Amino acid sequence: MEKLHLYHSPVGLLVLGEEDGFLTRVSFHKEINTPYIIEKTALLEETEKQLREYFQGEREDFTLPLRPMGTEFQRRVWQALQGIPYGGTASYGEIAKKAASPKGARAIGMANHKNPIAIIIPCHRVIGSNGHLVGYGGGLEKKVFLLSLEAKYRK
């Protein structure tokens, strides 16, 4: 059963989830449709610490054991997202090529939307091919905040 902890972050309430020693969730607060218990584990404490450091501009990379739950295609996309450097961006088309789905930019968008570990798997760094910011599961204002934060602290 997933263990959850709530973290009050600069972008609002985040739900942190762990199962079997792996981080399974960093999501913007909304209804949770799976069985869970509220418990602040050592991994969830470390996740909160690393997120706090990220928001303070002290951390660019996360060192947490991840297990995002999704299809094989979604996991390939999420793996490709982790290759976008801090402060950088990539288009849906670029991610499609890295995820071995060169004509699947629309499918990339759907996988991006289903990303269960927001911020740490940086789906906020994906932009339209024209350079414009496009949708974000947490809301476009959160995407703008995260990209601005990274631009401000990028070394």
Image: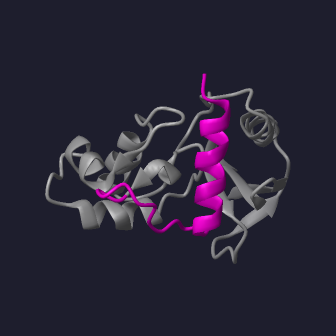
Tell which of 131 and 146 is nearer to you.
131
Q: Position of residue 65 (x, y in %)?
A: 59, 34
**Magenta residues (range):** 128-155
Please name the residue shown 43% across and 43% down the image. 89
- Residue 14 placement, left or right of 93: right
| Quarter of the figure that contains the N terminus | bottom right
Position of residue 49 measured from the top left corner of the image (x, y, whole percent): 81, 35
Nearer to us in this view, 25 or 53:
53
Relative placement, left or right, of 131 versus 8 is left
- Is residue 138 something that shows in the picture? no
Q: Is residue 129 magenta?
A: yes
**Residue at 41% across / 60% down in the picture?**
132
Q: Residue at x 60, y 69 (%)?
A: 139
- 147 vs 75, left or right, is right
Q: Say which of 83 and 115 sits in front.
A: 83
Residue at point 68% right, 57% down? 2
Where is residue 148 shown, x and y percent of the image?
63, 46
Q: Quadrant of residue 155?
A: top right
> Residue 17, percent across and down?
69, 53
